[in-house]
Image (cartoon, rainbow, N blue to C red):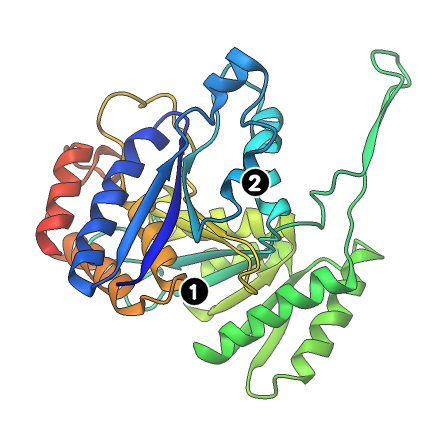
Amino acid sequence: MTTHHIALVPGDGIGTEVLPPARRVLDAVSRRHGFRLAYTTYDDWSCASYLREGAMMPDDGLDQLRDKDAILLGAVGHPDVPDHVSLWGLLIPIRRGFQQYVNLRPIRVFRGVDSPVRGALPGEVDLVVVRENTEGEYSEIGGRLNRGLPEELAVQEAVFTRTGVTRVVDYAFGLAADRGSRLTSATKSNGIVHTMPFWDELVAACGAGHPDVAWEQEHVDALAAKLVLEPARYDVIVASNLFGDVLSDLAAAVAGSIGIAPAANLNPERTFPSMFEPVHGSAPDIAGRGVANPLGAIWSAALMLDHLGHQEAAGDVTNAIATLLATTDVRTPDLGGTASTEHFTEAILQLL
């Protein structure tokens, strides 16, 4: 029997509440499909650890994760710890240390979840945002000078490399070839005169190598508007780190709730473990109340199963999610219902 070794990092806030339901779902489908998941849990990698010890994770944290087949993360963030401290202390070192250069964000309008956008209909909006995940606008190059003085300045450099752009764009074209053979590249080359024309040139070069994929480029501001006005026209969107970050959250909101959105941080070569996480954040305002929606973590677990080669098991999970939303009124408060995290999880497990 195949065994996969999974690192569980609950993190902060509702991350500790949504990871156990995801594990229960994983255990249910792994039994059905004849493989085994072995877990190592890192409960103390969190903002609580930072407040207590001055570090989000140990110095050898990456070494502890290196031999795992995948990482399932809950959430990162606490009001007492600045976001740039918590993210750069845990999430971003994992992404960059393990070359998880593809951030994959599937977006789908489920039957039974109303979109705030009139034209976003179930069965019509089903897209994926492929975000470059390790460089771009979120580089570490820059600094601040003359702090506290009238002439204080801050410099943040965007870094786009031929290798970094080409590999994520090539991944996106390959994904588009497996889906609807349509790709949209987010750019802003009319205003950002160096990095974005470079991005456009590399997209065009990759596009020439994928003649089966119809592709276009859109300026990111116009693309944001069209995602609201015509969300069904898009299939695969590839974007830089910042643009992909913004567009994927916008698209999730168009789909009805950022609370159900999953994400995969992929190292496609599988040299290092990939990491899977819901994107709803730690939600400290509802933490500890037992009402967190576990759907984002469960869907992220399905992405993990797919990455590990268990497509049928992953399909069972996403089908259960779709069936629950389409055929029952079980909803957590973020979706307008009264179900607890436990009630929602039990309903998913019954369908499985």
Determine which residue is flagged by label 2. Answer: 63
Nearer to the camera, 132 or 195: 132
Badge 2 density bin: few <14, some 14–19, many ≥20, Cα 10 Å: few
Q: Secondary structure at mark 2?
A: helix
List x then y, in percent, for residue 131: 58, 56
List x then y, in percent, for residue 116: 34, 48
Query: In the displayed structure, would residue 287 be above or below residue 53?
Result: below
Give the residue type at disc 1: Leu
Q: Residue at x 47, y 21 (%)?
A: 78
- The numbered dot on residue 127 is 1
Q: Earlier in the sequence, mark 1 or mark 2?
A: 2
Quadrant housing residue 237? bottom right
Whole-number angstrom distance, CA of label 1 to CA of label 2: 35 Å
Quadrant housing residue 282? top left
Query: In the displayed structure, would residue 143 be above or below residue 285?
Result: below
Give the residue type at disc 2: Asp
Q: Residue at x 55, y 73 (%)?
A: 183
